[in-house]
Image: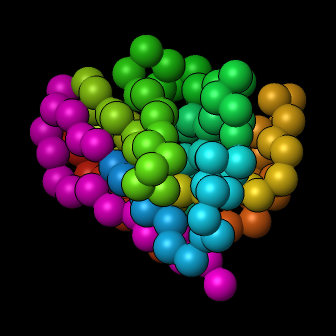
């Protein structure tokens, strides 16, 4: 059974940066590179929102308009880890952030939809103060 563990959240000031990490365990060797990966966030009273996603090939990327040019998703297949670099953080970015993965084709047209993903990390809290 696989496990996906997110880390890197914390309390920061507006304008600061954070890098979130999500490491996969129990993934068969040589298969991590085939996973489509995404980062979602959920604030109290709001629906879960995809902020960034990448296809398994890296050929397709998605960024929510609210984070475009501030956030960047990347992956290290050797470490079986996906990252979310968050720059110029704003109070509106405050949320619990979840990593997500799909071990099947992640189509570009639906990669921002939570129901496309089968594996989820436990979430890490990001709090951005004014």
Image quadrant in which you'd find residue 9: bottom left
59 above or below 129? above
Image quadrant in which you'd find residue 13: top left
Q: Judge from the rendering whether residue 18 lies leftward or rightward of residue 115; answer left or right.
A: left
Do we see residue 63 in this rendering?
yes
90 above or below 82? above
Q: Judge from the rendering whether residue 77 lies leftward or rightward of residue 113; answer left or right.
A: left
Do we see residue 62 in this rendering?
no
Seen at 27% across and 56% down, the residue is 8
Quarter of the image where the N terminus is located: bottom right
Q: Judge from the rendering whether residue 54 lies leftward or rightward of residue 97; answer left or right.
A: right
Q: Residue furthest front?
A: 30
Seen at 76% across and 58% down, the residue is 103
Image location of residue 62, percent across then percent down: 65, 27
Q: Residue furthest bottom?
A: 1
Quarter of the image where the C terminus is located: top left
62 above or below 9? above
Seen at 46% across and 35% down, the residue is 74
Quick one: 128 or 39, which is closer to the camera? Answer: 39
Q: Judge from the rendering whether residue 74 lies leftward or rightward of residue 28; answer left or right.
A: left
Image location of residue 18, percent across then percent down: 24, 41
Seen at 63% across and 57% down, the residue is 30
Quick one: 36 or 19, which is closer to the camera? Answer: 36
Q: Magenta span covers which residues?
A: 1-19
Quick one: 70 or 118, which is closer to the camera? Answer: 118
128 above or below 101? above
Quick one: 125 or 74, which is closer to the camera? Answer: 74
Q: Residue furthest top?
A: 69
| Magenta-colored stretch includes residue 14 | yes
| Magenta-colored stretch includes residue 84 | no
Q: How is the image coloured?
A: rainbow
Image location of residue 36, percent across then percent down: 70, 46
């Amino acid at each position: 059974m696989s496990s996906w563990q997110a880390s890197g959240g914390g309390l920061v000031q507006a304008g600061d940066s954070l890098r979130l990490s999500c490491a996969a365990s129990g993934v068969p060797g040589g298969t991590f590179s085939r996973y489509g990966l995404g980062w979602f966030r959920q604030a109290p009273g709001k629906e879960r929102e995809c902020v960034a996603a990448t296809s398994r090939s890296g050929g397709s990327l998605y960024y929510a308009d609210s984070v475009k040019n501030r956030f960047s998703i990347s992956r290290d297949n050797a470490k079986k880890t996906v990252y979310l670099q968050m720059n110029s953080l704003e109070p509106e970015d405050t949320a619990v952030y979840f990593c997500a993965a799909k071990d099947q084709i992640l189509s570009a047209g639906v990669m921002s939809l939570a129901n496309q993903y089968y594996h989820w990390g436990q979430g890490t809290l990001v709090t951005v103060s004014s």
